[in-house]
Image (cartoon, helix red, strand yellow):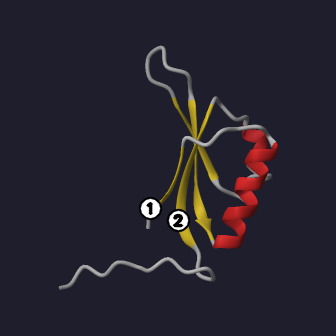
Amino acid sequence: MKNVKQQITLDQPAVYQIKVPDELDESWSDWLAGMTMAVESEGEDPPVTILTGKLDQAALHGLLRRLYSLGLPLISVVCVE
């Protein structure tokens, strides 16, 4: 069986994982396009919020603009699908 990778397109949704510094409150979850939120913290390192969800390119850009308007720097944006 061949391992087929899905090609990312502008109109088809894909699963993205976005990491931002600090801990976002759960009250932001509705504002963040319904993405799931998890907080990672290791030892004395500052916490990192991980947002995961299925978005198309337009929704992804909208979410990134929202994070920018909050003044949150991005640690990473990865397509995990």
Residue located at (44% from left, 17% from top): 43
Q: Give the image quarter of residue 3.
A: bottom left
Question: Considering only vertical position in the picture, is 41 above or below 78?
Answer: above
Cβ–Cβ below 8 Å for labels 1 and 2?
yes
Residue located at (55% from left, 22% from top): 46
Which amino acid, by three-letter code, is at mark 2?
Val
Q: Give the image quarter of residue 27.
A: top right
State left or right for residue 38 relative to residue 42: right
Q: Residue 54 at x, y = what percent?
A: 59, 66
State left or right for residue 36 relative to residue 31: left
Is tag 1's residue or tag 2's residue first in the polypeptide sequence? 2
Question: Considering only vertical position in the picture, is 42 above or below 63?
Answer: above
State left or right for residue 68 relative to residue 5: right
Residue furthest to the top in view is 44
Q: Which residue is the site of mark 1?
A: 80
Image quarter (top left, top right, bottom left or bottom right) of the C terminus: bottom left
Alpha carbons under labels 1 and 2: distance apart: 6 Å
Q: Which residue is the site of mark 2?
A: 15
Tell how many labels: 2
Residue located at (63% from left, 83% from top): 11
